[in-house]
Structure formats: structure tokens, C-alpha cells
Amino acid sequence: MTDTVRLSFDIGGTFTDFVLQDPARGRTRFWKTLSTPHAPEKAVVKGIKELLEAEGVPASRVGMLLHATTVATNAILERKGSKTALITTKGFRDVLLLGRQKRYSTYNMHLAKPEPLIQRRDIFELDERMFLRGRAPKAPNAAEIDALLAQITQAGYEAVAVCLLHAYQDPAHERLVGERAQALGLAIDVSLSSDVSPRYREYERTSTVVANAYVKPIVARYVKRLETALKAEGIGADLYIMQSNGGLVSPELATGMPVRIVESGPAAGVLMCRAVGIEENIKDLLTFDMGGTTAKLGAIDNGEPAILPTFEVDQVQYTKGSGLPLNISAIELLEIGAGGGSIATPHLGGIRIGPESAGSEPGPVCYGRGGTKPTVTDANLVLGYLNPGAFNGGNMQLDLAGAREAIRVHVAGPLGLSIEEAALGIHLMATANMDRALRIVSVERGRDPRRYALVGFGGAGPVHAARLARSLNIPQLILPRGAGVGSAVGLLAADPKVDYALTRLIPIAPGSATAIRLLRDELRARADSDLDRLSGTGERTRGLVASARYTGQGYEISFPVPDPDMPEAEFLASFRAAFGEAYKRTYGYHDAERAIEAVDWTFHAALGIGAGLSATSTQGDGDSVIGRRRAWFDPGTQGIEIDIHDRYRMAPGVAVTGPCVIEEAETTIVLLAGDRAEISACGNLVIAIGGRHERQSHHPVAGLEHPRLHRRGNGLNPAPHRLLGSRARGGRLLHRRVRPSRPPAFAGQFHPRPSRLHAGGGGHRLRHVSRRDAEARRCGGAQRQRPRLRSFPRLLHGDAGLRGRPLLRLDRQHRPSCGRGRRGAGLAEGHRCDRGLSGRHPHPAGEAGARRRVRCRADAHHHRQCAHPGGGGRRSRRPAQRQ
């Protein structure tokens, strides 16, 4: 119906965002209201009423409701799900608790494994057994199942997850448990792994079905309350809920498989970025969504977001293997606890941002709702980036005096900084956290950020996006219209979509095309059945994805499967070619002759009803300056007067240069010096990032040369040039010596050397020549001087904040350091140490002119491991030379 409107809404931790699209009038309206975490549906109803009244649209005209929610995500992260029991095969009670043997941080002696959603006391065993190929040597007893279910019910469990061994091959035993629970009429929700995740690998399958059962009652109650509240307001439109894979489903499907909506909101934001890329004809994008509680970062390659067959929630320091694995399709994203409401606190002489958040209740101090701890939003207000009288389109008034006082008491005072310096430190630290996460998404996953454009959105994203782009040398920043409600905008570009996966081990050989065809038809029937239950008409798109490997390997790679209806010889050749291309793209090579086997299969089906982002864009007259105010940008500088622009008055093609601030109703855009912004023909704000090559800093935040920020005890960040030779590991920077860029001659080789026991040098023995000795030999016997570390302080990175002390002190002149360290008091002033080519440490009195001497570069720890005077009386551990 052309007379109906589409309304989308996304519930965040601080704000609930709305978008109303009216095709008949060619209008799109954005709206924001504070979230109500204890009853999310209240903020939804309140915001919809306000938006419809503002646009003069009756509730009866709403034809479609599109919804993204974090209800399931918050239940998992906060461990506030329903009381859940697990029924598993006898002897496999500890699968969920043991997890995987592989450690996500190999050398961490205090490694904490992902905390499971349930405890061992919540796991019950059933005496049954299913073999790998589907043969059942022992079937479960119905009486035992009834007794087990009665015990679970009496213990007060709300939900039951069933994960029996090899149920992905034959679900008969799990089906029997579900049938018995239904026959007994028990008031508990039952989730079967053969329905939720019929894929192999027991730990991942168990974790997925437990998560589904854990959030199922909570999501069901929330959706029911939401539908009831909407009908009470006269809105009877069809409701669609966003999934983690970027597709919409009905409330019935969402409540049946709630684990599929864990990453609901962030997935919608990536779809918005893809639509913006299509408008601007840019296929490679990095996405940056910063809201009030978290920041989400992702990537789009060649116009399509990466879809992962499995992902993890609640990761530790963004490290793979540290979270809870979920076997569901999801858009590739990295989420960190850094948002506008993230609380700033002093930590180890520096500033730590998050992961605690003020949320919407009470919210940042400047909201005037009872908050007392300073947040990133408070800092941005103090720095002059936000307009206290025009926040959220003028619907909220910000308390500048309260924000300044909170920063003074909690941050500036303890660190000995001015209020503006502390506020700038908070802003830079929040950007540093997001920079590290964006490097993981881009550089660590093989993407060169210089070849990508950055799309920034979310309520707080455009405030930090320009500085973030500059730190990674990203040349272009795009801030779409409605950037402050980006995820709600992305819902308008989504289509209903379902996917089903299962495990079937099929060797790719003559005859396999028939098996693949039968498998595809089975999955297609299930997907079409679900799409038939959705209202709406549109073109259906389908696709089959295989996860295959070379025979004998342990892990797979995914790729689209060619049409199995083609002749078998042609299909086998196409399948091998598609696998070889995907394998080579991942690992750099492939073996055209080696046997291939496919393990997992995923079928996607979508219904094309997405309306896209078509909307009217306000065209200004080019005179966009609406005022001036003082703002702070760089450490060590005073505030400067800058222009304030109104985005809705900016005309296409008219450039605005930084430093300046561009205001719009839902967010604020900050441009740095050298940045140049203009409105594109599609209404998006396209910014050319300036000064990208002025600093080749190893540190994530550019512009930290101010000496006060490097001083011991109050620093906000280390000096960028002092990070030379550092390596990021597990959230810390571990420092090492700077090695020569080219391997020296003979390094790592064995060659003969005259023995000292023979005066004429007649005897020879083989010895290993180190890189150091070989370098010295190549340089004519003179030992090559290298920069060294004076100390080894640790730097807590990421959410823990940055320590404000010099990390690395380069001593290129080899000044004597003996006696200056905490443990070196026993060394004589001017003490020397002869280091021979073999790396030995002879007594200073011996062989005075045999080799070139260098001043001792060792601290007390070095002397305790050698025979030097003042070394603590400890002899060298170097083995005696063999004669």
C-alpha cells in the first residue's frame, strides 16, 4: 500500500532511535528518546507517539514496524537470563565447562576461561548413546526422561536445553525428550540442539543451545509486552525483528530462536553503511558505530558485509577464543565498551574509559538525571563540541557546570590537570580504545585502512570519527544523513531472511552432486516454509554455502556452492575451482590435486521488500554558519574560537573546512584542522581527512606531543616516538629491543672456529653463531650499537586505560647505567663490561685490549646472572665450554 508508512526503531543502552519513512509525501523523519532499560517497550511506545504527533500521521497509517533490540545481548552479557537446565548424554556433563583446550592467551598465568551461562549443578545426564554415523546402540528410556523432567521442574527451572551426543546426525533421541516434555504439559521452554544448531563440534553446539534456552523466556515476554503495548496505541502493523545475519523475521520466529537476534542492532547499522556505499559508489568501507554504551566496528568488502558462520559474545580484550561461541550466522563485527556514557576514572596515573556505563538511568552528569561520575559525553561538552542548548534537536538541555565539576572532582583533581586537559584526555582515551579495535578489524584481518573509507554513525560516532580516521590514515570519512540514528535507518534497507545450517560430511567425488542436490532441497523446503509465514511479497533469492576442507584437515573455509543441477562433471570442476579460489584467497595457495570434503552446509533465503534509504534531503543555501564558540582540540594548546555550522543549511558542493563543528538534530560532527567536508549529491556528508601523513605515529592517537602528557605520574598517553619496537599482546605492550632490519651474514649457521686449547689453532669445533656475533663480524669486528631499553614498564591498554609514563627510552650513546637502577647500587661508578663476540662476560680486568669494549648496558638483573662484582654473588648460568 502506497499510503502506508514504514517505522523502524532500535533500542540502545542510552537512547532509542526512530525513523519514519513516508513514501507518499517523500519524507523521512528521525527521532530519539531516552531508553528505559527495565521496560524497553515503554520508550518505544513513548517515542512512536511523539514521532507520529510531530509528523501528523495517524497510527492507522503505519503499515510496517521494523525493530532491532539488545534484549538478548544484555541478558547474556549481564548474566541475567532465565534459570536454565541442560540435559546431555551420560558421561559428557562437563563438555560446556571444559570448553576448548586451546588457550586464547598462551602465556597468561591467570587466564580466565569464558564463564558459562549455567553451572555444573544445572547439568543433568541422560543414559543414551548415538554413534557418529547415526547408529543408536542405546536408546533413552521414556521413564527416565519423565523422571529427569520432573526433577528439573521441581527445581524451578524456566528453560531446558537438550544437547545429546551426535544429535546433528540423528535427532531422534532429542525429539523424544521434546515430545515427553510436551506430553507432560510442563511449563518450561525446551530448546533442542538439532533445531537450534545441527552442526558438529560438541562444545560450540552445546554453548549455542544453552544460550538459546537462556534468553528464550526473556525475549518471549518482551515481545509479548511490546505487541500488546503497540496494539493499545492502535498500531496493528506487521512487526519484523532484525537478526544477527542482517535479515528480518517475524516475532514468532524470533522468539522460537532468540539466539539469532543477539547482534540485532549492530547488524542493522552495517546494512545502512552498505546502502551508503552503493549511493556513493564505494565498495570497500570500514564501519564505526558509537552509541551511548558501546562502539561497534566492522567492514564491508566489495560491497558486501562479511557473514561469519559462528561468532563469540562477551570476549576478553577482543581476543578470539575468549568468548562464548554461538553457531549462528552473523555479520562480522567487533564490539567494545566505549560509548558516550562510558565512565572515566583515574587509573595508575592515567585515565581509564569504561567498560562501566552510565546508560540512560541516571546517564551522564550533564543530563541532569542524577549522574555523578564523568563520562565521555561530559568531556565532549566541556571541550565545546556539544551545544548545551540544542542537544537532541533541542529536546534536552545539558548541564555544562555540572559536567565541569564532575571532571574536576573525579579526574582533573587526582591527576593534577586542568579541567580542559582532563576532558581532552578523556576524549583522546576513548578514541584510543576505538582505534585499537578498528586496527583489529582492518589491519589484523588483512585490510589496508588506506584503501577504505570510514562510515561513522551513532549518537557519539561523528564526534570521534574524524580523529579516528586520521589515526589510521583513512583518506575519506562519510557521515550519512541520519547518522545519529544509523541502525534504525539500516532497518529500512533490510529484507526478511532465514538461513538453516547442518553438518553432512560429503567427499567431493563422482556421485556427490546427487547428495548435495538432495541436501539443498531439504534445506530449501524449510526456508520456504518460514518465508511463507511472513507477510509481504517480493522476489525470493536463495543460495547454498558450503564449509569445506582438504581431506584430513581440521577446519573449514566457506564459499558459495555452484548450482548442483548442472551436469555432474561440470559441477565437480566448478566446486573445486570455487574452493581453490577461496582457499588461495585465505592462505595464499591451493592444491588442485588434493581430495576435498565438505562438512557444513548453510542455505540462505531472502524476500526482497527492503525500501532502501530513499528520502528527501534538506537543501541549504550554503550560508551554514550559525554561531561561534570556544573549543579545545590539541594537548598543550588553548581553546580557540571556531565556527558552528548547521548541516541542514549546507548546500551540495560547498566545502566547509576544519577546525569547526557541524550540528544536526541527532548528533554533532567535529572536524579537525585540515579536514574538508561537503554535502554529496545523495545528501551524505563526505569529508576528506587532512594531515594524514603529518605524523607516522605508532600510537593510535595523533597529536600527543605535549610534554605534560608524557610526564611521569599524570600522563594521558605515551609519546608516539617512544613506542618504537613495541608489540601489542593481550591488551598490553611488551617491549623488546630493536633488531636490525636485515638478517646479518652467517646468522643461525654453524661454522668451524679455532679451539683455544691448541696454541696453533689446529683443533676445530663447531659452534653456533648468533645474529649478534655475525653482525659484528660483518662490520669488521666492531659491535653494532643498537638502541636499548632503560626500563620495562607495562602499559595497560584498551578499556583499562593508558599509563602516563615513558614506555621506551632509547640510549643510542650507551651511557653508563650501572649503579643508577634500583638494584644497581652495589656497582662501582664507571664499571665496564667486556662483551666478546661469543656473548661471554669476562671479568673487567681480563683481556683488556683483546676486543672492543663497550660500557656495561646491564641493570642489576643482568649482573645477578653473571660473575661481575656487585652482581649479588650469583654465577653465570652459561654452560662451561667443552674442551
Image (cartoon, rainbow, N blue to C red):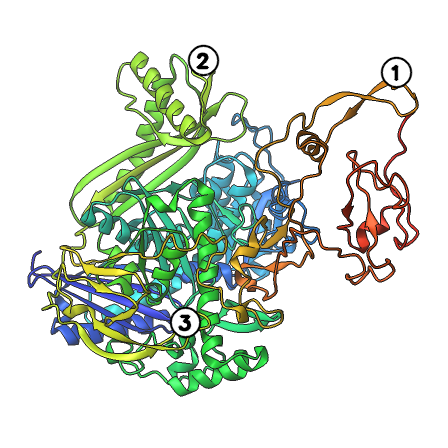
**At 61% across and 62% down in the image, what residue appears?**
806
Q: Earlier in the sequence, mark 2 or mark 1?
A: 2
Q: Residue 593, labelled with which disc?
A: 2
Is residue 232 shown above or below 730? below
Which quarter shows the N terminus? bottom left
Q: Secondary structure at mark 3?
A: loop
Name the amino acid type tagged 2: Glu
CA gap between label 3 and label 1 equals 84 Å
| Closer to us: 656 or 833 | 833
Residue 354, given in percent of the width and then of the height, sits at 51, 67
Horizontal side of 4 relative to 582 (left or right) equals left
Determine whether label 2 and label 1 are within 8 Å by CB.
Answer: no
Asked if residue 667 can be seen in this view, the reply is: no
Q: How many other residues sit within 10 Å of disc 1, few (<14), some (14-19) or many (≥20)?
A: few
Q: Secondary structure at mark 2?
A: loop
CA gap between label 3 and label 2 equals 57 Å
Q: Quadrant of residue 715?
A: bottom right
Q: Residue 762, labelled with which disc?
A: 1
Is residue 101 shown above or below 79? above
CA gap between label 2 and label 1 equals 55 Å
Name the amino acid type tagged 3: Pro
| Closer to us: 360 or 633 | 633
| Closer to us: 46 or 379 | 379
| Residue position for label 3 | 37
Horizontal side of 735 relative to 58 (left or right) equals right
Q: How many other residues sit within 10 Å of disc 2, few (<14), some (14-19) or many (≥20)?
A: few
Q: Residue furthest front?
A: 849
